[in-house]
Image (cartoon, helix red, strand yellow):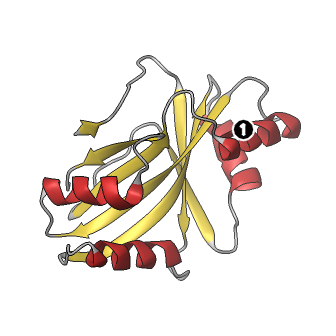
Amino acid sequence: MKNNVQVIMNEKFWIVEIFKKKEAFDVFGKEIKKNIKELGILNVEKVRVSNLYKIITDAGKKNIVKIARDLLVDNISEDFKVYRKFKKIKNFWIVEVFFKEGVTDSVGETAKKTIIESGILKKLEVKTGKKYYIKGNLKEKEVKEICEKLLANTLIQNYFIYPKG
């Protein structure tokens, strides 16, 4: 299900998803879970949070992996995946949040500048977002409420909800 969204077709892009290593504590996931319970939605078992970098380029995966490994990830506490299309995960609702077109993405602009200055790529765009994995016996209506009250500022951000796999 897509909400509040403008889909741009025929873009060539990669997603770099950065997440805490299994042994590292996901403080943001724990805080979001607490905030969801404060909304009165009690069926949430677990929340994990990842940072997303949507890199719009014609470059191949090898260059994107180099960018992720060398420039974007803290190799001590984080790991990453590079993909074009993600797979659903059993028992998890997935929510992605990105800035709307035209809204300044300071982190994306900084990442773009860093990538260009590193010499890995010269032509690209970078958009940043968050990905939330929410495990629990939730209805779509509850997930939408979580998005609109906690995860996204709908004035400047779009969110995408993907049902449990």
Q: Residue furthest front?
A: 155
Residue 108: where, in percent of width, then height? 66, 41
Residue 86: where, in percent of width, then height? 38, 45
Q: Is residue 18 left or right of residue 158?
A: right
Which of 45 and 21 lies nearest the eye of the viewer? 45
Q: Is residue 86 left or right of residue 145?
A: right
Which of 113 and 16 lies nearest the eye of the viewer? 113
Which of 48 and 57 lies nearest the eye of the viewer? 48
Residue carrying label 1:
109
Q: Which amino acid type is marked by label 1?
A: Glu
Answer above or below: position of 25 versus 88.
Answer: below
Residue 144: where, in percent of width, then height? 23, 52
Residue 155: which quarter of the image? Answer: top left
Residue 165: where, in percent of width, then height? 20, 54
Give the secondary structure at mark 1. Answer: helix
x 68%, y 59%: residue? 73
